[in-house]
Amino acid sequence: MSIYEAKTNFSKYVDLALSGEEVIVTNRGREVIALTPLKNREQTGFGILSGAFEDFDWEKADSDFQASFNQDKLS
C-alpha cells in the first residue's frame, strides 16, 4: 500500500499488523517499511500495578502508618 493509503487508514493497518498480517508500505512503488508488532514488551508507566492491590486493606495500613508516628514529637 502507498504512504497515502497507510496515512489515510493507519489504525486499520495497525490492527492488521497486530493480528499477524504482513503490512508493507510503499513509496512510489518501492517497498520502504513494514509495520510489525513489538514483541515481549512489558507494560510500564500508569496502570502497571492495575489490580495488584485489590485485596489490600488500605484503612488498616493507614491506621498502622498513623500509629507508627511518635505522637509526642508531633505536638
Image (cartoon, rainbow, N blue to C red):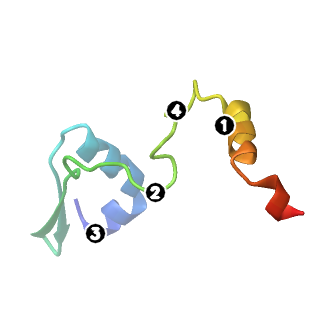
Work out whether mark 2 precedes mark 4 in sequence or the reverse, and give the earlier one: 2
CA–CA distance in space, label 2 to label 4: 14 Å
**Separation (CA) of disc 1 from disc 4:** 17 Å
Gap between marks 3 and 2, in whole Å? 32 Å
Note whether 59 is above or below 29 in the view shown: above
User: Label 1 crowding class (10 Å Cα cut-off): few <14, some 14-19, many 20+?
Assistant: few
Q: Which mark is residue 61?
A: 1
Nearest to N terminus: mark 3 or mark 1: 3
Residue picked out by circle 4: 51
Label 1 – label 2 distance at C-alpha: 24 Å
Q: Amino acid at mark 3?
A: Ile
Verify CB contact (< 8 Å) between mark 3 and mark 1: no
Q: Secondary structure at mark 2?
A: loop
Vertical arrangement, residue 11 with respect to residue 53, above or below: below
**Which kind of residue does numbered mark 4 sit on?**
Gly
Residue at 19% of width from left, 48% of height from top?
A: 39
Q: Residue at x 69, y 38 (%)?
A: 64
x%, y% of residue 7?
Answer: 37, 65
Q: Nearer the viewer, residue 49 or 33?
A: 49
Callout 4: SS: loop
Which residue is label 3 attached to?
Answer: 3
